[in-house]
Amino acid sequence: MQISVLSDEVWQTWRNLFRQPRYLALATMTLALGIGAVLAVCALLYQSLLKPLPFRDYERIVSIGMDPGGGEHIASPGILNEIAGIDAIEAMGIVSSYTRTVNLAADESPVVGELLSADQGFMETLGVRMQQGRNFTKEEDVPNGPRVGLISHPFWRDHFGAAPDVVGASVFVEGINVTVVGVLPSSFRWINEFDLIVPMRVAPDSTDLDTNQHIVARLRPGTSAEALGSQTNAKVQAMLSRMRAQIGVEGYDFLSARQFDARPIRDLFSGNSQSTLWLFLCAALCVLLIASINLANLVLLRVVVRSHDSAVRTSLGATPFRLALPALSEALLVGVLGSIGGALLAWLGLRALGALAPPEWLRGEAITLEPILWGVALACGVGVALLVTVVGVWRGLSGGVSHELVGGGRSGLSRGAGRLGQGLVVAQVAVAVVLLIGAGLFVRSLYELSSVPLGFRSDGLTTFSLSPVKTLYTDVAAVKAQTDQVVRKLSESSGTEAVAAASHLPIGARLNLPITLGDGRSIQPQFRLVTAGYFDVFRVPIVSGRGIGTADNMTAEPVAVVSRAFADQFFSGSAVGQVVRMGRGADVIDQLRIIGIADDVRAFGPAEDAPPTIYIPLEQTSDATWRVVREFGPLRYAIRMQSGGGLGEAGLRRAVQDVSPTQPIAEVVSMDAIVSTMTAEARLHLLLVGIFAGLALSLASVGIYAVLSVSVASREFEFGVRAALGATPPDLIRMTLRGALIQTAVGIAIGVAVALLLGAFIKRFLFGVALWDPVALLAVLLALVVASLLAALGPALRAARVDPAYSLRSM
């Protein structure tokens, strides 16, 4: 065949296709929905799990530590010193696993910023080259060394105007001068967003085992993370045995029970997102599968429509390739347009998702469609279109369509091709059932999460953070005085019902500090410093004893309130009157008597049990305890407003500045918004799976419509004969609908079976819901039956309108 003849026929096919925009739009949109769903998830997968990290030879960088639960991987300075001599390690460093909220000033006005602590080996291990200046030196990274810092690229741009001479400039941290020695490059990313990095200054003989850090190590060429993890675990367990013998108490059993290992550095960035993203990819592939089946059915419909033309061309000697060429030409155009449409849908979806995606998915960057993904979209779209077209043409031309010139004017599908079409509808419905069951279970799970009582009231509460400037509030007495003044000032504001301050809010933050019980056991419960009125502001019930009041000051006996979980776990419920002490081993301080038991608060969200918690009056806090607590974050204030009242952010800032003119505040947000973030991941799961399930239901409905349309078109002669023999239009409608419902029922049965087989994988994302949840299953059944009936109604009505006289004349 000449190229010119081939190109002319392709062009003629495209011209005819553009004259029938309904088919072109339907086929293109069907393919675009499948391509867009897969491409959007692939973009998220690439961003979170596949995109190269901005570190030199990052494949050789690992994180060393233990997993306490929740996907973290943490270690301590003592562990860093213990494993320093392992031969497999080429370089090693340590960085805090959290940022500290501090008051920063690079110009006249102070701001609230985030501070990260790291040692000299951290940047060296990552192989980061500074935008300006240098890394810390070993002389700077020692106790009592010079006060120096590395600033982030955004901080350099926003507060120094990207000045080229910033090295040597000053940043005041809590009023203390810190000299800038380096600026990080714009490409640098870490798991925590920060403004400034200061030296951690780990003492070479430190045995500190409080695990609030990440250890990063660069492996020597030819060594494995598994071997390093095994050596690390052996050394750490030996260290713990020595320390238990020295201390004389079982103070570190919580570490002994953990396995220490080495993991790829990427795991720190991705956290628990890997399984979630793979779940979404499976859901997106299901949507693409349904779209592909639909496209094949649409192709078959086109083959039936062109049956007369194909019969004429066959009688004139056309080869099978020439018969298939129009369909293949249409497939090429649909594939290209569907790929472009899918990429645009993915781009729009990612832009809408940007504000909802967890930070570990984004790594501090905007979600984009990388150039390689555009190529994947084009190859996938064209490939799928051509493949399903070949299948559709084969079904239509290889014994499937009885052409008019052969069959006496009758056209239709063979029984084999008809059964194959029905089988594909069953497959579509089955895949849609799996997605719809998943969406239904996520709806039920989110409902159950939202119904769990958190143990406090969040309505009507506004919160903000305040980190007392260290140079102005040098000790805990000054901090108490500032806190009293701020609480009093806010309490006097119009519309204020109650005010309290605490080291942490009831939910959304973790702080474990060591506590020694009366029998010598060392534990690490959740720890809260609170002011009088804390339990009233958050409406936390006191179930035994009393709460913390204004009389609990420095002149009174040191006291504490514990949660119900604390009392049950450590005192069999009888905690009131018991004595505990702050600290562990030789560091025990502050003996406290328990005066009350508060109801449990789910501090980590509704999906986790309430942890044992101890509350200590801020008024009775010692300098030693305050120095520890202030390193883990600012004070958080909560104001309960009367109905219709509210200071607003500007009013809160004015109230604080009336007390402390140079004191900035940050994170002004309602408590309801903070609570909402605790179920944000569940809502995101529901949103994405719901979108995919909705697409699957829509595409499955289109598939049923397409197959029944082909069936009605191919059985027009049969319907006419039945009508001539006495079949009424309702009879023909029932016959058509019955076939659709049978296919739907078989698809539902298969889909439910597959969903149950996948139950172990799905269940890990659910809360308080069984896989056999009757509400979810009934909702899926109802949705699919209704969708099937609506999709089948149009073809059924066309079957009922067949003219029997036309069929009799064709006999």
Image (cartoon, helix red, strand yellow):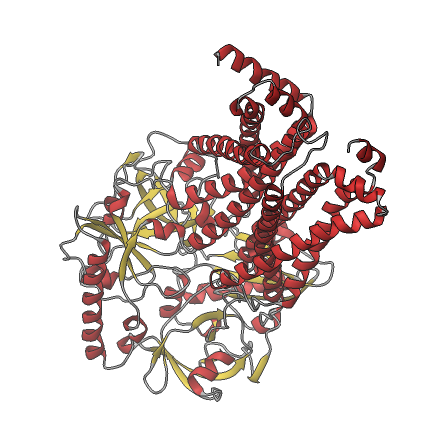
Q: Position of residue 755 (x, y in %)?
A: 54, 60
Work out whether residue 556 can be spotted: no
Residue at 78% over, 42% down = 719
Residue at 55% over, 38% down = 36
Q: Position of residue 461 (x, y in %)?
A: 63, 62
Q: Nearer the viewer, residue 736 or 285?
A: 736
Can you tell which quarter of the image residue 747 is in? bottom right
Locate residue 674 relative to residue 523 in the image: left or right. Answer: right
Work out whether residue 571 can be spotted: yes
Quadrant occupied by the C terminus:
top right
Q: Position of residue 342 (x, y in %)?
A: 55, 34
Task: Give the vertical position of 193 relative to 470 (above or below).
Answer: above
Residue at 49% over, 79% down = 565
Q: Nearer the viewer, residue 730 or 413?
A: 413
Q: Position of residue 97 (x, y in %)?
A: 36, 56
Q: Nearer the viewer, residue 478 or 752?
A: 752
Can you tell which quarter of the image residue 185 is in? top left
Task: Give the vertical position of 690 relative to 233 (above or below).
Answer: above
Figure disc tally: 0
Task: Give the vertical position of 551 relative to 354 (above or below).
Answer: below
